[in-house]
Amino acid sequence: MSLEDLKKIPYGKTAIELKNISLAFGGVKALTDVSFEVKKGEVFAIIGPNGAGKSSMLNVINGFYKPTSGTINFAGTDRGEMEPELAAKSGIARTFQNIALFKGMSTLDNLMTGRLLKQKQNFLMQALYLGPVAKEEEEHREKVERVIDFLDLQSIRRTPVGSLPYGLQKRVELGRALAMEPEILLLDEPMAGMNVEEKQDMSRFVLTVNNELKTTIVLIEHDMGVVMDISDRIVVLDYGKKIGSGLPKEIRNNKAVIDAYLGVSDD
Amino acid sequence: MIYKETGQYKSSYKSDHAIFPLLQDKIAFSTLMFIAFLIVPLVINSYWEKAILVPFLIFSLAAIGLNILTGYCGQVSLGTGGFMAVGAFSTYKIMTSFPDMNIMIIILISGLITAAVGILFGLPSLRIKGFYLAVATLASQFFLVWLFNKVPWFYNYSDTGQITVSERTMFNIPVTGADAPPYATYLFCLVLVVTLSFAAKNLIRSKMGRSWMAIRDMDIAAEIIGVPPLKTKLSAFAISSFYIGVAGALYFAVFLGAIEVTESFDIMTISFPVLFMIIIGGLGSMLGSFLGAAFIVTLPIGLKFLMVDMVGLSAVTAKHFEITIWGLLMIVFLIVEPHGLARLWSIAKEKLRRWPFPY
């Protein structure tokens, strides 16, 4: 499995398939027998109450957690587990629920870290900063500048991200993931704690990435308005089990989902 | 007004990414290099060499080394003395085994040997962090010093356990040994320090430095974007140890000439002062490494001058006061400016930009 395998898959066909994934930490069962598939090019949402295992699911997909049982079929290859580095190399990028930026570095440097895997010059060349290194830096800087343009981050290019407001930090984190030019983008609550305008901006960014770069998006989000609006398909988790999946309108009318999570407004 | 960037437009990413992007910085740095390379060698005497300039250069190098590890990669180390001892003893062993080898090459090989030792002692860093890692590196400090004391092979079975440098030349001018002229030892150190500083700065502003800082700031996220934690941490240990090893080699071969390991590479004489240098200078700042080294090297001299020559205290009393004041200053400093001298400098630059307007 590699980035090439993933790129070869036609849009609309399965990119990642999770089969009977279970994950336990000692006696705590975070996930039990969860199966679903993510199709290439779609916006796929994972929803559910707090502690349902949504973030654990993302961590399994990009190899941060190793599932206790079950297999992950990634771009046609079955695997028992992923490795974070391999996931990054194969074109999976992600953002975190609690912002995980490099706080001491500037916005520009944070975005440049997204390019690390693509920089090939060895450390001796870097120490001497010879022609090829400078050229490589410039190439990647150019890619990063495009992301900066897209996300409107020009004015904070040199600001250490630790001092930025929350909404902007979230945006920089999305930028870092986009700088990796991922095929699959895992977003863990990208709109948590944002006001309506910021949510609209973020939704617009996510949809643009999906429409124009054709990036597959796996999204965890609690704002049902956003989820129902922007996602193509949804899976619902509760207590580590899958309780429903399908199109947004199917989920909205799913009895189990309404009982566990969505609730009813008028009785 | 003095330090304004207005009108200095960058039209390429390359010029934007330069080490000194501003004209004022370029001028200041060129002037400094002009003085350091052409004026100082003409006027330097033995006192300035032995008391200030050479120790400043050597400790700057050690501070850069530790700053790479602690300031940029976030791995606290108290083993600086031990690693400097590795550099010193490697130099001694190579020097006595290969009498014809060039001193520059000997010192660089010593750095590489120290880098290898650094990797070895860096292995625990994958599992332990913060204070626990500091304690683990403390073990390397004590173990290495013990080793160089215990195994006579390292000091060629001499009776005293001391190692002594023999005379080596560069371009037929002695740079080590008792007959080396002040300007030669100074220039020898300066060339190494300037070259290695640029190499360090280049590493920091390219892929390697960003990987280190990513590991320092958020190791989980770094792993997820594809930075391998072990490899990155070990690379920081290796390169940091290389710098510290070269500093140790210079400390022995060029500066002291003869050393005894327990005394010269003790935790109190090397490891803590170098750590203070980077804390006072500024963690994660190249400039900070130099400022910190300058501060720690010149402070005792300044205090001694003040107390013995100005106030008229006896040398012994002054020495006691000196230690107390040193400690006190350290505490005051950390409370007033925890980000170090480098931060003070950037505040000063900010003020110079706006001067004479007070807003």
Image: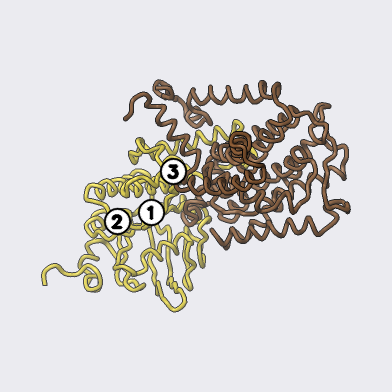
Write the residue at 54% across / 51% down: B74
Kind of residue at badge 2: Ala
Of labels 3 and 2, earlier in sequence is: 3
Picture quarter with the C terminus of chain B: top left
Write the residue at 22% across / 67% down: A262
Residue A177 visible? The answer is yes
Q: Which chain is brown?
A: B
Q: Could you tell whether B343 is left or right of B61 in the image?
A: left
The single residue placed furthest to the bottom in the displayed view is A27
> Quick check: do tags 1 and 3 share a chain?
yes
Q: Nearer the viewer, residue A193 or B271?
A: B271
Q: Choose top left, top right, bottom left or bottom right for residue B249.
A: top right
The single residue placed furthest to the left in the displayed view is A266
Q: Which residue is mark 2?
A: A192
Q: Nearer the viewer, residue B279 or A133?
A: B279
Are the residues tagged 3 and 2 within 8 Å (C-beta)? no
